[in-house]
Amino acid sequence: MEQKINPLSFRLGTTQKHHSFWFVQPKNYSEGLQEDKKIRDCIKNYIQKNRKKGSNGKIESDSSSETHIEIQKEIDMIHIIIHIGFPNLLPIKGEIKELDKDLQKEINYANQRFNISIEKVKEPYRQPNILAEYIAFQLKIEFHSERQ
């Protein structure tokens, strides 16, 4: 019988990093994971809702799969780093405050602050998920243009 290994856990420390950095008591571990999932879902929903539109009025790309969210928790601060393939698709100016308010509502912590930063992926077309999303988007455009 074969043993299956999660590819991410197999590569941690050599070619990839952890997605979250925090420590809790073992009895609170599941709460921390649920909190991370809420944060990631809130950010992905925010990104899908606030994408810039292209010159033709259509949304340029589905940037939800082009993101990698890194979460680092401290005692009174949660650092969130959003690695995105194409940051010019998002309206960044003043919108981080809106995302911060959405996260505060979702998490419901009075003493926690969020430090949110957006970083561009250096070579987005070398990331397989970004490349696959780009190809799918191009095929979708081609399909819609043929139907009209």
Image: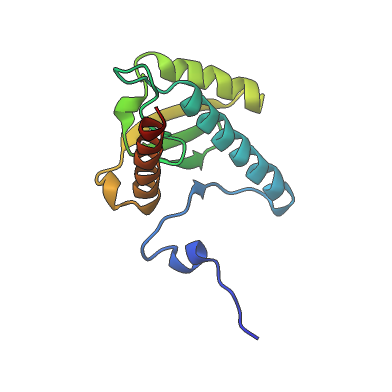
Name the image quarter holding residue 87: top left
Pick the residue in front: 13 or 133: 133
Mark yes or no: residue 54 visible.
yes
Tell me residue 69's x, y (percent): 46, 40
- Identity of the residue drawn at 39% across and 58% down: 16
Which residue is outermost to the bottom? 1
- Identity of the residue drawn at 46% across and 16% down: 97
Vertical placement of residue 74 versus 46, above or below: below
Name the image quarter holding residue 11: bottom left
In-image side of 45 versus 125 (left or right): right
Tell me residue 122's x, y (percent): 25, 44
Pick the residue in front: 127 or 119: 127
Tell me residue 126's x, y (percent): 28, 52
Tell me residue 82's x, y (percent): 41, 36
Which residue is outermost to the right? 27
Pick the residue in front: 22 or 14: 14
- Identity of the residue drawn at 40% across and 24% down: 59
In-image side of 142 versus 29 (left or right): left
Vertical placement of residue 95 versus 39, above or below: above
- What count of labels does the image hold? 0
Name the image quarter holding residue 96: top left
Which residue is outermost to the top? 94
In-image side of 29 versus 61 (left or right): right
In-image side of 125 versus 97 (left or right): left
Quadrant that contains the C terminus: top left
Quadrant that contains the N terminus: bottom right
